[in-house]
Amino acid sequence: MVFVLEGLQWGDEGKGKITDYLASHMDIVCRHQGGNNAGHSLVVNGVRYALKSLPSGIINPKITNIIANGCVINLFSLIEEINTLKEKGITNFNLYISSRAHIIMPYHLDLDGAYEELLKNGKIGTTKKGIGPCYSDRSSRLGIRVGDILEPEYLRKRLEEVLPIKNLTLRMVNKKEYDLEDLFNKLISLKPILEDHIIDTSRFLREAIKENKNILFEGAQGAMLCLDNGTYPYVTSSSPLANSVSINASIPPQTISKVVGIMKAYTTRVGEGPFVSELDNEIGNTIREVGHEYGTVTKRPRRVGYLDLVVVKNAIEMSGVNYLSLMLLDVLTNITPLKICTHYELDGKIIDYIPSTISELNRCKPIYKEMKAWKEDISKVRNYNDLPTETKEYIKFIEDFTNCKVAFISVGPDRDATIIKEDIFND
């Protein structure tokens, strides 16, 4: 069976933990888009692993992990990430990297920072990891791909074509230019380290589907950061939606069996852009501290707000989500008042959708449903029926409002702090 795990908000929903949990049922875990700007945190046996580009199944030695062609990869950062895992004792893993994936070049990082500086008050709030410029070069046909490092003559030819254009751009934004020989030598030095991992992953995945392997696709970020359907321009440079897996991994769309939408019990976002249910007050600060809402990669504080079901329902309907995974529910213990945003008010009109323009979305005001708070510590609960009545009411409201069942409930950071409410494998 082929499963897709999709973030339903602005990313950071806790995909790493649920991917790690679901991976116990999988033969393959595949990262299908994004770069090393969005991290996954896994806590296994009390040890925290901060992953950036590596798929979340990398901790499990029985799983084949794939970085697909829809990803952009900083190869130097990837090697550092692998070495960090090895230092923590994770040495037995299977990793394949798509030869078609694009390389985040050093000049992409320079340009990312320069563009943010030039935008001034209109800045996007990127992590300056070079993701956007790399995807731009991909679309402009100026990209360098992972498979190119296996063919030195072709790589040199590509650099001779591309680097003069990039150096001209760098010169225009007062950034240092790159020497072709130096850049070529640095890239070629990666060949002996990575060549055994680089394959045509699209063929590998299609063969695995024919063999009825269990495959889990995970993306970076969340639905509201989708380049086409998110809060543009405050979005990422690719699409995290389940709809995009087919192109990002080169598999037929009809092979996808189920889509699991992952959401926090509240809402967070990083960077600039509209956030209708944002709490810039003591409640927001409390949720941030209890939930440790700081970036896995950047460590910058995340913006925090009440759960916004307008956002969640929009993502569910766009992607055909079959089940929900509700994360960090334990963080809301003792949060009073406890509210859920169900609609927006736009210029005096009540709406249940996300306006397409930033101007309209900035004018939206949240309409809340107040929920009963719970005071009991739920972090040790492992059975749904043992949850407090108020907690179950919170979950049921989400299910009824979205018309989508909650399958998994996370009540703590560790792998086993998860309540299984629905069996998604045998329905």
Image (cartoon, helix red, strand yellow):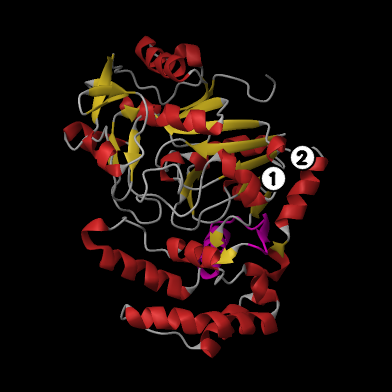
- Please identify the residue farthest to the left as the structure is shown: 281
- Work out which quarter of the rendered image holds the C terminus and state it: top right
Name the residue type under label 2: Lys
In the image: residue 407, left or right of residue 362: right
Is disc 1 placed on a helix, strand or loop?
strand
Image vertical order of residue 372 relative to residue 36, above or below: above
Q: Which residue is mark 1?
A: 28
Instruction: Say which of 51 and 277 sits in front.
Output: 277
| Three-letter residue code for mark 1 | Ile
Q: Is residue 8 magenta?
A: no
The answer to whether the residue labelled 1 contacts the one labelled 2, judged by CB atoms less than 8 Å apart, is: yes
Residue where numbered disc 2 is placed: 213
The percent position of residue 334, horizontal first and vertical second, equals 26, 22
Q: Quadrant of residue 212?
A: top right
Q: Residue at x 52, y 70 (%)?
A: 76
Q: Which residues are magenta?
A: 73-100
In this view, the residue in front, 398 or 372, is 398
On the image, the x and y values in percent for residue 288 come to 28, 39
Residue drawn at point x = 66 percent, y = 74 percent: 148
The answer, for residue 220, to whether it is visible in the render is yes
- For the residue pair 327 and 106, the one nearer the viewer reads as 106
SS of the residue at dot 2?
loop
In the picture provided, is 142 more to the left or to the right than 130? right
